[in-house]
Amino acid sequence: MTRLEEDPGNSRPIGIFDSGVGGLTVLRQLLRRLPSERMIYLGDTARLPYGTKSRETVVKYSLKNTSFLVEKGIKCLVVACNTASSLALEALRQAFPIPVLGVIQPGAERAARLTRNGRVGVIGTVATIRSRAYEEVIRTVESSIEVVSVPCPLFVSLAEEGWTQDEVTYLVAERYLEPLRKRDVDVLVLGCTHYPLLKSVISGIMGEKVRLVDSAEEIAVQVRNLLDQNGTRNAGRERCAPKVYMTDSSPHFLELAQMILSLPATEFEYVDL
């Protein structure tokens, strides 16, 4: 028997949380790369958005979310929220005895490797941009890189509304992204897990020469590597459907979630934290 087969703990689920529907883009990438892993997702839809809240509030919500998932027996945690990753990651690592991964580091490192002209753009919530978390990681990789950061708070609401191709979304995006175009960035980090839902709009405005970095794709690779390194990857071959919890029983969230994940409504459940 292999090491994976000897350890029944490898069948424990991976936990993922976000403030809302955006983190489902992370879950989608995890399902693609780790189809045999059990996964539990918590969308804190009752308290979104996190990006306009204080550090103390984000940490409090993150601890509560993680406690819920840890009670489900998860073997590692993915913080699929850039705001929580920038403000609460260390508090979570100190509070819980499981590996805790955030979405900022893998996305920032990827952006630093991709840039050719040394100018990287970052878009995110107000809290994420204010934390300068992406900038710090990018400059750790290469100190000479110029980082241009722009908060785009309305993108979260537009994504949650499902306005991924709406004329209003184009107008808002053009206004937000103009400073990045003027600075001639050649790589743009989508520093919020909601933003990949608006990828076609963002890409259309920035132009084909600008590479977009989706942290959801990068964190999925990091999780797979972590499980392999720790010997905790599930050896089973059966594809597992995720369990999705939400803190507000919003029909709109359910519709968006079903669209993103192509799951039946039976896989979603309301929970009061």
Image: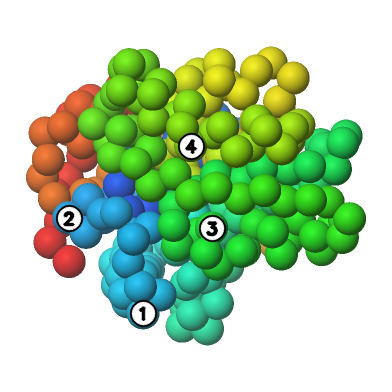
* Residue on which disc 3 sits: 129
C-alpha span from label 2 to label 4? 27 Å
53 up-or-down from 113: above or below: below
C-alpha span from label 4 to label 3? 13 Å
**In the displayed structure image, the side of residue 39 where residue 61 appears, left or right:** left
* Residue on which disc 4 sits: 176
54 up-or-down from 25: above or below: below
Say which element carries label 1. Answer: helix
Viewer-side residue, 236 vs 272: 272
Residue type at mark 3?
Ile
C-alpha span from label 4 to label 1? 27 Å
Residue type at mark 1?
Glu
Whichever of labels 1 and 3 marks the residue nearer the N terminus, that label is 1
Q: Nearer the viewer, mark 4 or mark 3?
A: 4
Q: Nearer the viewer, mark 2 or mark 3?
A: 3
Whichever of labels 4 and 1 marks the residue nearer the N terminus, that label is 1
Residue drawn at (17%, 55%), measured in percent from left and top? 46
Residue type at mark 4?
Tyr
C-alpha span from label 2 to label 3? 23 Å
Whichever of labels 2 and 3 marks the residue nearer the N terminus, that label is 2
Query: Measured from the top left, where is residue 199 in percent x and y?
Result: 51, 25
Residue drawn at (71%, 37%), measured in percent from left and top? 183
Q: Residues within 10 Å of mark 1 (few under 14, many from 20)?
A: few
Whichever of labels 1 and 2 marks the residue nearer the N terminus, that label is 2
Identify the image quadrant of residue 180: top right
Q: Nearer the viewer, mark 1 or mark 2?
A: 1
Q: Residues within 10 Å of mark 2 (few under 14, many from 20)?
A: some
* Residue on which disc 1 sits: 56
Name the disc covering residue 77, or none: none
Residue type at mark 2?
Ala
C-alpha span from label 1 to label 3? 17 Å
